[in-house]
Image: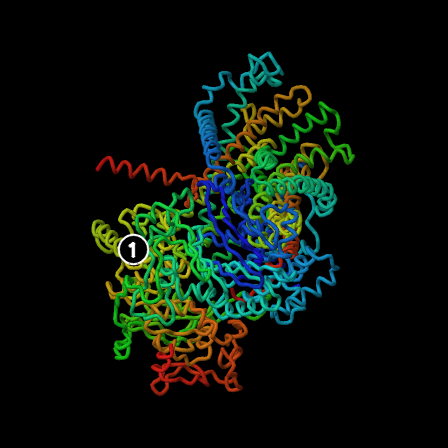
Amino acid sequence: MGFVLRRLSASLPVLLGITVVAFLLIHLMPGDPAKVILFGSNAGPDQISALRQQLGLNEPLWRQYFHFLDQLAHGNLGTSYLTQNSVAHELVSRTPSTLVLTATALLVAIVVGVPLGLIAGVRPNSLVDRLARGFSFLGVAIPYFFLALVLVLLFSVRLQLLPAIDDGTPQALIIPAVSLGWGYSAILTRLIRGRIIEEYRSDYVRSARARGCPEWRVLLRHTLRNSSIPAITTIGLQFGNILTGAAITEVIFGRAGLGSFLATSITNKNIPVVQGAVVLIGIGYVLINLVVDLIVGAVDPRTRLTPAIS
Amino acid sequence: MTGSAQVSQQQREDLQMADVQTTDVVVRPALENAGSSPRFTSRIVRRIAQAVLLLGLVVVLLVLVAPGLIAHQSPIATGDNILTAPGHAHLFGTDQLGRDVFSRVIYGSRPVLMASLAGVALATLAGVAVGVLGGFAPRMVRALVMRVVDVLLSLPVLLIALILIATVGSGLSSIAIAVGIAFTPGFARVVESSVRKLRSVEYVQAAKVFGSGGVRTSFRHLLPNLATEVVVLISSGVGWAVLTATTLSFLGLGVRLPAADWGSDLAAGATNLSTAWWLSTFPGAAITLTILLANFLGDYVSAVLDPRGGLGLRRGIRSFRTRQKGTRA
Amino acid sequence: MSLLEVANLRTEIRTPDGVVCPVDDVSFTVAPGETVGLVGESGSGKTMTGMSILRLLPSGGSIVGGSIRFDGRELAELSSTEMRRLRGNEIAMIFQDPMTSLNPTRTIGSQLREAYRLHRDVSRADAKRRAEEVLGLVGMPRPRERLGDFPHQLSGGMRQRAMIAIALICEPKLLIADEPTTALDVSIQAQILELLADLKSRLNMAILLVTHDLGVIAGHADRVVVMYAGRVAEQAGTADLFADPRHRYTSALFESMPTLEMDAGRSLAAIPGIPPKLTDLAPMCRFAPRCRFAADDCRTQDPALVLSPGGHQHACLHPRTSAGPDPDRREVLVRVRREASVSDRKAPLLELHQVHKAFPLRADSPLGPRRQVHAVSGVSLTVQSGETVGVVGESGCGKTTIGRMLVGLDRPSSGSISFEGRDLTTMRRGELRHRRRNLQIMFQDSAAALDPRMPVAALIQEPLIAQRVGTRRQRRAEVAELLEAVGLPSDAGTRYAHEFSGGQRQRIAMARALALKPKIIVADEPVSALDVSIQAQILNLMRSLQDRYGLTYVVISHDLSLLKYLADRIGVMYLGKLVELGTSNEVYRAPRHPYTAGLIAAIPLPDPVRERAKEESTLGGELPSAIDPPSGCRFRTRCPRATDLCAQVEPPLQESAGLHAVACHYPLDVAPVDDIAVAV
């Protein structure tokens, strides 16, 4: 329990920092928010300054920030400049579909990457290992948006097996998830392979064998668990990148979700939406890594310990 | 002093490296195979690898300096033969406006390479500056600097890049700046942890004992050892930068049309995917090859720079030097 | 009928540098219930012999010849499944480092249960019961609670007990113990060795004790097999071997060891050179290049094992013939001891006064109290010019921190360190830097202390450049002189540190420490990473350099016999405190602190007769935490004489009536030194 508290308190400054970044966006992004909101309405300077007043843009920066924080604490992310809808509502309604794609891509990465890395690591320099190394080398090199097109070309255009664009069916998820997950499975393969080879050289594996442990048991009970730790941490650290990857994949496949919403908001300078997205993604990242640390703590007791001296 | 959070912090720092380089763990091919494969295979593999690398680098250089030497047609000249399949006249076919795809792929490499190389250079400068500051500064300053880095690290690279581009507007230099700034926190993290690790290394402490001043120790021991880590960081960051830069140009934030660019050409070809596969495939393949080459180079560089053994470059140079001395004497 | 019969065993390992043959034509036997010691330096093939028996060779390794018969079965011919059933069940093995040899992510209980259920068809509950029983057997306190612990939660000694428990859970007939106590402190080592001897007789099992430590062998092996460079050099009963070694290597090994009772005025008989690489060796005696008795025939033919009466075997063409002093032995009295000069009180060169050092620890919770590790708590010590002061103690006693503070790597939290009468702790930075040239340090791990990117010449002249000493030409000449002084070839300067062996690297570190012509060199465990024969080379070098340059040494070590040989005075540290301080003769022959006495008793003597006559070690228990050290006397938790007074009042370090200083309320009675010397 102390561990969770300590981790939480360590991530508080990061969370605060994220809100600062999000807040500063108003002043970083070019264009007067009031003008953006009133764009096309032929509003005069009076109206604009009135709106500025209303938005609190004339107040000192720190007061604006505290106001922003206060709103945030109440779950209020402001209103979209374009639709005047609640940003929180718009973001939250689009989040599930993006999360589903992210999760599926992660699943692909794990289902492909972990076993491949495992087999390759158990038999280094075997045929499987050479193939796996080639795969992982190529896997990190192919951009997911290119892979997506190639897969569409193969499976939708030529073979006509899978839908090219989102039609709401679960099959429509396959190509986006595979193309996004592919690169990460390559990363995992490489990571796990390296770890397994390392673990196999360690003393405790030797002593497990010396007590008569069969090889499958050495792998499943001893090395696999210990090599999974860096893989779990990597997934946590890559979470943000997978999420943005998912957003771009959504744009390619015409899927509704955070991606296309965010993309249009950035080009339209719809600042509250961008702010909301930054806060949402930042919190998501911190939460995911909290969970990752808890999992790592459960798998590897050494990270949990309260230290004596060493 | 093994604080629990410290342990995970350490792992985190090690892995932050993976965050920057898609090539994650720094694999040292030469060393890794040492246990099981006989020496002669690795020597042949090494020769082949060196040849491929050299060839790749020559091609990249040629494309950057004199693309006209390779592609004889103008990348932007439209023609009557629209959407012709790859063949003799047009090696990679033509696009919707009858432009030669081969020429566009060759010329299209320039914005990508320039933006990503410039971006990595920027990130290296800024990252090393921030990282060295973080590594050397007193505790409070370091804590503050690294907290800011932590905050930026929690935001995805692409999101930072997109916001920056929304701020400064699209274009090639924007992409370079966006890549540079988005990569900085990751680079800074790696540099900072290397500096801290190096400062506690025993040979740095030994230098302190015989009275080597802080500045001297930094130049004699820290920087040379840090430099190799930075070189490894750069070489493995290039592939990731190419990916980020092409993603941005894929989204139409790069060069102004009709100039050739891999990312935007790939996106443009997507609409004709079912009828003209070559439009997207060749730029895509070019991106893939570039990233492959960059990662390959990264692995090679990190293997060469390993001071103990490595690929024996050092030993080779030295034996060359002593041989020269011998002839002179 | 022997339990294990290894005959003409030959093992090869394929590596990128060619085929290495770590075990070459090795034969020996182990009878049921017998302890056979397999002794040799690193690279002698002793560990690989052990691994070959279990068929657990590293990748690329294979048994290419000979036979291993165990209990009537040929192990080399068993299928891998049959072999697996044997491992841990009939032959078990324990390893050097219990920290890395236990899976860090699984509990002790789970690893014990696994070991049992792999070979016995029992329920989980039964396995748990058995696990608890075995943990009790190996002397683990509160075994039931320990079952749920992870390896990192146990101390080093307890971890090794857990390892032994895992090995013994199926009651094997043979236990292969590979350097079982090398990673442990002396007092814990004694406990573990006693435990092994006790378990052996209780379970009637045989032990193959693989070690580099002749002391461990002397006390615990029935027979000894000495290995050198992959071959058996000599094989005999323990008493026989120690009394009458035949092989020139064995006798040279005995001579090169600093022992507690050897005359410290004599130089050690070092074995020159290093062991050969085990690739493509021509037929010859492998020790010949380092042997001062080698003749032409040693360099052209393989010596065969010769059997002499009493089962004593040796493979030497010119064996040592009889017991008694070797006429050829170079007994050089190098120096007169400095004890006399210590007594006349001139101003000390270096003085520590009430030095404390505490390191802050991360608090348990964000708001929790700040905690500190008290590494050094109030140490006062003086060092006279030209003497060698030894600081001895077990790991965690603060001796390394003392060394680091002496050379200015750590600043004391309080107290003062003065050099030539000037306080270093209050000195300004520029002056301190200049003063530093008089205080140099040699680290334990010279591989880490030498920048891998610099050639040796640059490394050695670095201190000169840093202190702006001499011109380029002078510095180059200086490097040449230093290389010569530490016994390195003149072309060593162009090579890199990682191209040298451990002993040679220690010479490089020595040369660098000497470059500024310092008055004091602090040597932190200067030889603990080296093999015995190489150790002697470095120790002799340190002594000859001391005479040549008039150096003062502060030597920090865990090894009391080494300090007894090297140091004029010894300070014994326990948990951040100096508990005893006197000349090395006084401290060793007439220890006054119970801890010192226990420490001396715990050192395994390379003499079977006396080692076996020793009483059980008196140092029970383990080192308490330095975060909350015990009140009063810090040793009271392990002290047989402790009373309430010890818990309340901290004993000061003081001399009394012509006896050396001790910090104890109830110091041991001291018989006049001469009597004991006669008895020894």
- Give the chain letter at badge 1: C
Q: Can you give x and y, in whole percent of width and height, for residue B202 in the image?
A: 41, 57
Q: Quadrant of residue A124?
A: top right
Q: Quadrant of residue C42?
A: bottom left
Q: Quadrant of residue C466?
A: bottom left
C528 over B20 or under it: above or below = below
Q: Amino acid at mark 1?
A: Ala
Whether residue B227 is visible: no
**Image quadrant occupied by the C terminus of chain C:** bottom left
Residue at x 28%, y 54% (from the top left corner): C487
Residue at x 34%, y 76% (from the top left corner): C583
Residue located beneath label 1 in the image: C466
C65 over C466 or under it: above or below = above
* Residue nearest the observer in this picture, C518 or C315: C315
Extreme residue in the right direction = A169
Whether residue C632 is visible: yes
* Residue nearest the observer in this picture, C460 or B222: C460
* Residue nearest the observer in this picture, A287 or C383: C383
* Residue nearest the observer in this picture, C543 or C8: C8
Q: Can you give x and y, in whole percent of width and height, for residue B91 in the image?
A: 56, 16
Residue at x 53%, y 39% (from the top left corner): B178
Q: Can you give x and y, in whole percent of width and height, for residue C130 in the image?
A: 69, 65
C133 over B103 or under it: above or below = below
Label 1 element class: helix
Q: Can you give x and y, in whole percent of width and height, for residue C624 in the image?
A: 53, 73
Label 1 Cα crowd, 10 Å radius (few <14 / some 14-19 / many 20+): some
Q: Is residue C221 left or right of residue A151?
A: left
Q: How is the image coloured?
A: rainbow
